[in-house]
Image: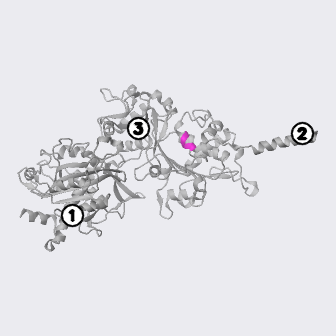
Amino acid sequence: MLNEIFKKSIFKIQEKIYSYRNVRLEPSEWIEKNIYLTSAESRYPGFFSYDRSPYTKEVVDCLSVNSDVECVAVMKCSQSGFTAGVVTTIIPYIISETPSNILFLSGSETLVQDTVRDRLDPIIQNSGLSHLIRPNVFKKKNQKSGDTDFKKEFAGGSLTGATYNPRRLRFYSAKFIIADEFDDAPRADKKEGSIRSLLENRAKSFGSTKKICYISSPTVAGQSNIEEVYELGDKRKLNWCCPHCENYIPIEWRIEKEDETFAGIKYELDEEKKLIPESVHYECQNCGGKIDYSQKYDLNLTAKWIPTAKPKKPSYRSYQLNALVIPPGFDSWVDLVYQWLECCPPDGRIDDGKLKTFKNTQLGQTWQELGKTPRVNEMMTNNVRSYDIGVVPDVTCKNDGNGRIVLLTLACDLGGVMETNNEDVRLDWELIAHASNGQTYSVNHGSIGTFKRNRKKTNLERSNESERDKYTYSHGQRFSVWPVLKKLIDKNYIGQSGDAYNIDITVIDTGFFTRLAYDFIKGVTDAVVVGVKGYTEDEYRKLNRDTPVIQRSREMQNSLYILQVNQLKDILASNMKLAMGMDGFQPYGFMNFPQSSMGKYAMKSYFSHFEAEHRVPLMKGDIEIGYAWKKKNSDVENHFFDVYVYSLASREIYIDILRKSYPKYSKLTWDDFVSIVDG
């Protein structure tokens, strides 16, 4: 009898053993069930809840063993809740549920020590997890070495706290890497190379199971570490469901709408230019509905992270967060507007230092070096003249004391897509007259083709998409751009004096759509047409480098020139700053523009392109050793800025062609050319 009962009991035990399934909770679920905070660690004591910072929940779950994500980057504002929601809560989860080696990094030993001692240790203790921390080895005299501010050992792995010291990083190996305050790390080390590559190699042996999480507020664009890894991911933005139109909208400080007004944070000032606090609200960029600060908590609970880009790898994710969505109890919208007004007073000068801090720490955005960006407002005021579009201003030029119009150039920039089943392009062009004293007069600009990025289209343009004529760079097609361009080249242009002018040289950007552009250039035998493309040896131009702005290409010596684009953009930016004298004198390089008409030479269609790029320094320590001109962001238009750069190069190219074509002009200069033309 006892024997039978024993057998049945054994069978039941075996059945339970063999039917056992290891169901592991996702990090966010486990954290809410197990992590307990006291008033010393949080203003919200009790079990941790993601209801207070729900936007951190998706990020922490990316570090789950069930997730395919290998690399996460969070570019954020300060005091956002990511330390509590991700850093100090994922570590206990790993120790308890999926033990392995963890490498936790921060900007200094003090930051590492404070995070472990003041935040992580109390969480482990208050959550009843202290028994999991036990040394794997003992020192002499039975001294434990497995539970310090920089090292914690547990069954299955260990936690190492460290700084971004490149000479020490190479000795660590970890499956989980938490890189906090990543912008405090050096970008590169002379001996070890890229810090990011060095860091990621610490997890190389774990293959696709590795988990690397970068978290930081950003700093200067082009130098920020977190910006670099953010750009590799899918660039997710937090979207609220608008309580009025029920569309999901990305929450941004300021958003330009199709009618050129702005949505986002709105406020009013009184007669003394003081903020009216109760006026502060968020305006939906989709419907214009008013969203109050009191609605933020509920909107956060239903918010979604929505990707805005294709990641470099499917396993890369990146997030960007600003202070508009952080939990109530931190800086309110009114607080943020007060800070904004300190940076940008209504009737005062912008404080770049305060604005940089605001963008980095409150908007979670990189700081653009605004001092190196061309400004067009003064140029529109001082450089727009009284001549008409399409007319060569030879009389105006003479009256300005700038001599004669001695050269007419046409420059073209190619854009669009040429895919198997989608050919949709636009060629942007500008005609410029060059004065004998070195000034320029813009004559006309335009576009051949109707291509426009989808995100730039208005609702009306999207609805009429099927009726739009799509142009192509293919030859012999109905809507090929090349016959239209050839008509521009062949046309006679009439001056104010009644004299006729022909285009002396046409330059075409061949950096993209190279073969099709070359075919056109080689096919033109009755005009001077050449291709241009940027010098590609180095993205950055070294300072104090003495090189000519143009160089004949070995590839097509008679019809292709290589440009020092960064150097030419420096020249253009300098020309934009030139001012006319009180007596009307115009310095060499001064730029003149016609009166705006029919949408041409207007701020949106033309002049805004000249503010689309900024000069980004290449730093070595605290020393600038080079620079590059880059677009401020992917949304800005810079086509006519590039076209003007090609126009500056066209003058140098024309002189070089004359040197090459006529032996007696082998040392020809611009002044020599002017003397010859003037007779």
Task: Look at mark 1 in the image and give the residue it sits on.
Answer: 653
Scheme of colours in the image? one colour
**Sequence order check, earlier mark of 2 and 1:** 2
Q: 481 and 434: which one is in front?
A: 481
Mark 2 neighbour density, 10 Å: few (under 14) some (14–19) many (20 or more): few
Question: Residue 657's quadrant in the figure?
Answer: bottom left
Looking at the picture, how far across and down is residue 332, in whole percent? 45, 32
Does residue 665 lie above or below 36 as drawn?
Answer: below
Boundaries of the magenta span: 57-61
Task: Look at mark 3 in the image and give the residue it sits on.
Answer: 252
Which one is closest to the eye, mark 1 or mark 3?
Answer: 1
Question: Residue 528's quadrant in the figure?
Answer: bottom left
Left or right: 586 as drawn, with respect to 335 = left
Looking at the picture, how far across and down is residue 635, in whole percent? 35, 45
Mark 1 neighbour density, 10 Å: few (under 14) some (14–19) many (20 or more): many
Residue depicted at x 9% and y 65% = 676
Label 3 and label 2: CA atoms lie apart by 70 Å
| Amino acid of disc 1 | Ile
Does residue 602 lie above or below 246 as drawn?
Answer: below
| Amino acid of disc 3 | Glu
Secondary structure mostly seen in the magenta stretch: helix
| Amino acid of disc 2 | Ile
Q: 115 and 94: which one is in front?
A: 94
Task: Look at mark 2 in the image and give the residue it sits on.
Answer: 5
